[in-house]
Image (tube, rainbow, N blue to C red):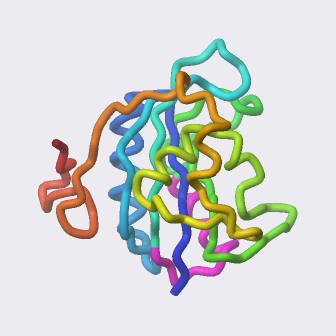
Amino acid sequence: MTEAVIGLGSNLDNPEQQVLQALKELDGIPGIRILKTSSLYSSVPVGPQDQPDFVNAVALVKTELEPEPLLNALQDLENRHRRVRLRHWGPRTLDLDVLFFGKRIIDTPRLRVPHPEFRNRVFTVIPLLEIMPDFLMPPENTPLRDLTGLLPERDLRALTIIRESSRFPFSSAGKPDLH
């Protein structure tokens, strides 16, 4: 079993609900178990600004899947949420990224881990810092907190704080446990 960090984002079709539902579905994928989830955050889009703001979160998962099968599972989940790729960095119902996969460095035509843009995106750094304040980023084992002064926090605001009420923020009724 490997711990991986998954980034989630949406800016179409009720983005907050898209991310919350994706978290629930992600936890139901065989071989994946959510350990922690960040709060939900709103962020300005990367790339074209003629689109709505995004809702973002990160999840720490434990997985039996290897990196490419994990990517396949995430892309299947995106497709179930009617993800359409019309333009680079364009609007989307759901975007799921493998940000980290244990301490592994992966560079294949389909997958680069650590995610090459992770360090430049406040909407991934701050949520990960929330759930893993002592995280050391591979390959150099740089403390995650060292990035906070380099990012434009004005482009990020907390939306929904998810309280960890066990290992996952959903009750058996499927409603988020919020405070």
Task: Check residue 51 for magenta coloring.
Answer: no
Q: Where is residue 166 in the image (x, y as percent from the top left)?
A: 20, 68
Q: In which quarter of the image is the C terminus?
A: top left
Q: Can residue 71 be seen in this view?
A: no
| Image point (21%, 48%), residue name | 176
Q: Can you say whether 142 is above or below 163 in the image? A: below
Residue that appears at 68% across and 63% down: 142
Please identify the dominant SS of the magenta region: helix
Q: What stretch is highlighted in magenta?
A: 62-77
Horizontal and vertical percent position of residue 59: 45, 58
Count of picture labels: 0
Q: Who is closer to the viewer here, 47 or 133?
A: 133
The image quarter containing residue 99 is bottom right
Q: Position of residue 75 (x, y in %)?
A: 60, 56
Is 142 rendered above or below residue 82?
A: below
Q: In this view, does 146 lie to the left or right of 17?
A: right
Q: Which image quarter: residue 86?
A: top right
The residue lying toward the viewer, choosing from 43 and 144, is 144
* Residue depicted at x 55% and y 24%: 155
Could one spot residue 147 in this view of the protein? yes
What residue is drawn where x is 28% and y is 42%?
Answer: 161
Q: Is residue 4 left or right of residue 173?
A: right
Q: With 58 as the anchor, is 99 left or right in this view?
A: right
Residue 30: x and y in percent read 43, 77
